[in-house]
Amino acid sequence: MDDILVTPRMRLRPFTEEDLDEVVALDNDPAVMRYINGGRPASREEIRARSLPRLLGPGFRAAQARATGEWLGWFCLAPRADGGDTVELGYRLHRRAWGRGYATEGARALIAEGFTAGGVRRVTAQTMTVNTASRRVLEKCGLTFVRTFFGEWPEVIEGSEEGDVEYALTREEWTP
């Protein structure tokens, strides 16, 4: 897969350490983090030590608006811990980018790249059952509901009593 992926409105590029300030701002927006950690803030050092190394790893890309260079958030098509040809789709966008189709545009582009050039056989994604906006994005990208599950999470957050959902799409099911 190429390092930089260009969509009609975005440039998805590898993360650098210079993205730290943007990640700190993104991860400290309670609305952005509502379905991830209940909106709890994280310190700059916590993000530098825990989040940034993961974002610098394989499959993660910072998203910028092509027209302005504005930092919108990030997307990933990350290898799963069990290896193989299944990857996990994820994204996190600033509120100012919500409701404008960026999540669907970026996710579709990564899925297409994974299936056509990346040797991916299956894409999975997970979100909280109550995160209806994210579930709509997954469905618009062609992923279908697989199951509801109840994981062991370190903190209970609002809506977690309804569990999480998994979605998936195989190369054979995918429609370019």
Image: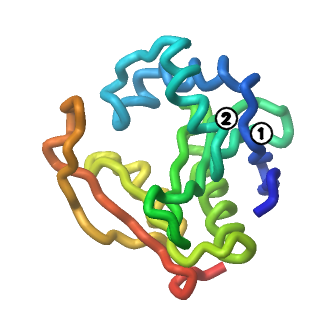
Give the x, y percent position of residue 80: 48, 58
Viewer can see residue 31: yes
* Measured Cα–Cα span from mark 2 to mark 1: 7 Å
Q: Is residue 150 above or below residue 14?
A: below
Q: Residue furthest left?
A: 161
Position of the C terminus, as image quadrant, is bottom right
Mark 1 crowd level (few <14, some 14–19, many ≥20, 10 Å Cα): some
Q: Which residue is mark 1?
A: 65
Viewer can see residue 140: no
- SS class, disc 1: strand
Give the x, y percent position of residue 159: 21, 39
Q: Amino acid at mark 1?
A: Ala
Pointer 2 with pointer 1, Cβ within 8 A: yes
Q: Which residue is mark 2?
A: 72
Q: Amino acid at mark 2?
A: Leu
Q: Foreground: 136 or 121?
A: 121
